[in-house]
Amino acid sequence: MTVVSWLMRLGFLRSPPLVGLVADAAGLRFGLLIVPAAGAAVVALGAVLLHRAEPSGTPPPQKPPAGRA
């Protein structure tokens, strides 16, 4: 939770200057396009968390041996 909080703080402090730099170089429309693009990237990369293993205290489910009931 602490890592997520620090990443949110860094994003809050770093994103306005980044948008400003891009807006100066390529235009305001493209600069503001960074915000939804970053959100889409977070959603897409967040899907990786769904495939993580169970917590270390919980063993993975065992399948019964083939041919035995």
Image: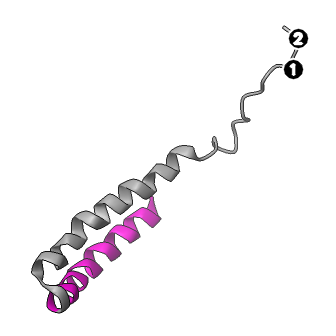
Q: Which residues are magenta?
A: 1-24
Residue type pointed to by label 1: Pro
Q: Is residue 35 left or right of residue 52?
A: left
- How far, Cα to Cα, is label 2 from label 1? 6 Å
At x 33%, y 68%, the residue is 8
Q: Splitting the image into 4 quarters, where does residue 62 fall?
A: top right
Q: Which residue is mark 1?
A: 65
Q: From the top left corner, tell me how far across and down residue 60 is, in percent.
A: 72, 34
Which labelled disc corresponds to residue 35? Answer: none
Q: Which residue is mark 2?
A: 68
Q: Is residue 7 left or right of residue 14?
A: right
**Considering only vertical position in the picture, is 33 above or below 68?**
below
Q: From the top left corner, tell me how far across and down residue 48 is, in percent.
A: 51, 52
Q: From the top left corner, tell me how far across and down residue 36 is, in percent.
A: 23, 63
**Considering only vertical position in the picture, is 9 above or below 54?**
below
At x 70%, y 40%, the residue is 57
At x 25%, y 84%, the residue is 18
At x 36%, y 62%, the residue is 41
Residue type pointed to by label 2: Arg
Which structural element holds mark 1?
Answer: loop
**Considering only vertical position in the picture, is 21 above or below 39?**
below
User: In the image as oriented, which residue stretches furthest toward the left?
Assistant: 28
Of 36 and 53, nearer the camera is 36
Of 54 and 24, nearer the camera is 24
SS majority, magenta: helix
Q: Splitting the image into 4 quarters, where does residue 33 fall?
A: bottom left
Quadrant that contains the N terminus: bottom left
**Residue 25 among those drawn in magenta:** no
